[in-house]
Image (cartoon, rainbow, N blue to C red):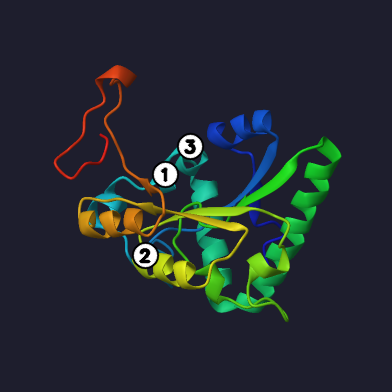
């Protein structure tokens, strides 16, 4: 079993979070069908797969990609042991955050789109219930997740819908339900030059 699952502040965005008082742990798995054993992104569009961050940043290194595939295989083949290790990692994150005077924060779908709210951990309904004092956040293209969370909110879990080239209508519905929607835009455009497309989303 992998001895460590969470990566702690290994990218520029989460490192900036320390200035806001947060220490972030992210779980990076192999996206979509990359592992060869399970599809971790069941609602990924063609554009999403083409622009996936799996090979970005540290993911450009072969050993890092292999480690993410190995973690995914462990998750698929021995979910109970995997979740036990994840619990240990979150406890370690909390301990480190407390030592640094920061608040721990967790993103479980760094490069995946798994419904963690449906996976029990011991006697807890899910990982969020087990760590009620820790904020979790994720992005998803699975609209069903939003519906479930709207009907049964999880106080410490923030979910943002990820817009793609093929889910415009669901993006509008996500906004109507009160969720944030993230959309990719072109680089190099000045703040004052932001334009809206015909659907009303900022590009």
Residue 1 in the figure: left or right of residue 146: right
Disc sitting over residue 57 in the figure: 3
Disc sitting over residue 142 in the figure: 2
Q: Is residue 79 above or below residue 143?
A: below
- Residue 71: percent from the left, percent from the top? 57, 63
* Of callouts 1 and 2, the N-terminal one: 1
Of badges 1 and 2, the one in the foreground is 2
- Residue appearing at x 47%, y 72% in the figure: 151
- Residue 55: percent from the left, percent from the top? 42, 44
Residue farthest to the right? Answer: 99
- Residue 128: percent from the left, percent from the top? 64, 65
- Residue appearing at x 55%, y 62% in the figure: 70
Tag 1 secondary structure: helix
Q: CA distance from mark 3 to mark 1?
A: 7 Å
The reply to whether discs 1 and 2 touch (Cβ–Cβ < 8 Å) is: no
Q: Is residue 68 above or below residue 23?
A: below
Residue 11 in the figure: left or right of residue 2: left
Q: CA distance from mark 2 to mark 3?
A: 25 Å
Disc sitting over residue 55 in the figure: 1
Q: Is residue 190 visible?
A: no
The reply to whether discs 2 and 3 touch (Cβ–Cβ < 8 Å) is: no
- Residue appearing at x 24%, y 57% in the figure: 167
Q: Is residue 90 above or below residue 51?
A: below
Which corner quadrant of the image does residue 141 belong to? bottom left
Q: Is residue 112 above or below residue 96?
A: below
Q: Is residue 175 visible?
A: yes
Q: CA distance from mark 1 to mark 2?
A: 22 Å
């Amino acid at each position: 079993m992998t001895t460590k699952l969470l990566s702690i502040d290994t990218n520029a965005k989460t490192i900036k979070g320390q200035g806001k008082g947060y220490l972030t742990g992210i779980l990076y798995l192999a996206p979509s069908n990359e592992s060869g054993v399970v599809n971790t992104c069941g609602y990924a569009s063609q554009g999403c797969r083409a622009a996936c961050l799996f090979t970005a940043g540290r993911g450009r290194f072969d050993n890092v990609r292999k480690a993410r595939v190995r973690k995914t295989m462990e998750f698929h083949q021995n979910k109970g042991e995997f979740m036990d290790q994840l619990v240990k990692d979150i406890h370690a994150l909390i301990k480190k955050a407390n030592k640094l005077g920061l608040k721990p924060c967790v993103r479980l779908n760094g490069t995946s789109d798994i419904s963690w709210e449906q996976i029990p951990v011991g006697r807890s309904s899910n990982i969020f219930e087990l760590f009620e004092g820790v904020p979790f956040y994720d992005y998803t293209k699975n609209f069903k997740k939003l519906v479930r969370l709207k009907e049964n909110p999880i106080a410490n879990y923030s979910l943002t819908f990820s817009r793609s080239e093929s889910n415009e209508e669901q993006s509008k519905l996500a906004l109507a339900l009160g969720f944030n929607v993230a959309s990719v835009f072109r680089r190099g455009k000045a703040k004052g030059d932001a334009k809206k497309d015909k659907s009303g989303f900022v590009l």
